[in-house]
Amino acid sequence: MKRLLPVILLLTAMSAYSQPKGMGKSDLDAQKTLDAVSAKFKSFKSVTAKFTLKIENSAGKVQGSKSGVVNMKGGKYHISITGQEIYCDGNTTWTYDKSSNEVQVNKVDPSSGTITPQKMFTDFYNTDFLIKSNGDVKLNGKTLEEIELTPIDKTKTFFKVLLDVDKASQTIKQTKIFEKAGNRYTYAVNSMITSGALSDEVFTFDSKKYPKVEVIDLR
């Protein structure tokens, strides 16, 4: 099976931010901004977000780009991205690859530290990171606050994460991860719907819809 969603898999190794004593006011404000973003997202009953995943090399040359949609409800999620689908009903995860017509089934392990889409919008930055504000940046003509996260653990495969936050709407518009190997992963949110109602069926893989699918059950 092909390697799925580099950003999410990369973030699996991440926790979040933990500030040392004596940080400046701007950094304290950055922490408050992230706390507000987390609280706002947790208030939504369900979320549908369209996103773009872009991979660049160290010179900034684009190596690949994919668009997708993620649906979230409580601890459930469904990710649809070019050629790939991931379903999770809170207990089981189905990872489907369209080109091979193969689905891998895994049991959700709460202790694994895996970063779910929900955590990407909320509290994946709770511990083990230094946080600082880089001030305002422009993205698609909009002024956002750029917040930089640096891992305390220097054995991580990445050395920096940049979050571009819309303080007015209290949402993360873009996340950019810098790998030590040189690659840069940018996860941009293009739109977000928070007023819809999502059925639980959205988050379960239905093999009847995929004729002759090969099921690899690793539970």
Image (tube, grey):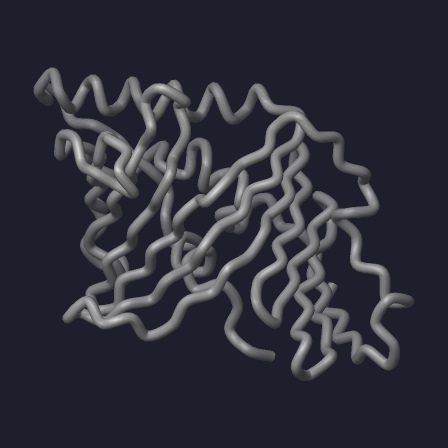
Residue 179 as seen in the image, left or right of residue 9: left
Q: How many circles with numbers are drawn on the protein? A: 0
User: Residue 49, located in which quarter of the rendered image?
Assistant: top right
Work out which quarter of the rendered image holds the C terminus and state it: bottom right
**x and y percentages locating residue 128 in the rendered image:** 28, 39
**Residue at 59%, 33% in the rendered image:** 193
* 110 shown above or below 183: above
- Residue at far right of view: 208
Q: Looking at the image, which residue sits at the far front?
A: 141
* Horizontal and vertical percent position of residue 173: 37, 38
Q: Nearer the viewer, residue 204 or 48?
A: 48
The answer to whether 119 is drawn above or below residue 115 in the figure is above
Nearest the eye: 59 or 95: 59
**Viewer-closest of 209 and 213:** 209
Depth order, front residue of 115/185: 185
- Give the residue at x 20% y 33%: 131
Q: Quadrant of the rendered structure where residue 48 is? A: top right
Q: Specify the quadrant that holds the N terminus.
A: bottom right
Quadrant of residue 56 in the image? bottom left
Q: Is residue 201 above or below residue 37?
A: below
> Residue, x 66% and y 65% (percent of image)?
95
| Image coordinates for residue 30, horizontal then vertical, percent | 23, 24
As drawn, is 154 to the left or to the right of 193?
left
Identified at 49% across, 39% down, the residue is: 119
Left or right, 213 with respect to 144, comes to right
- The answer to whether 187 appears left or right of 3 in the picture is left
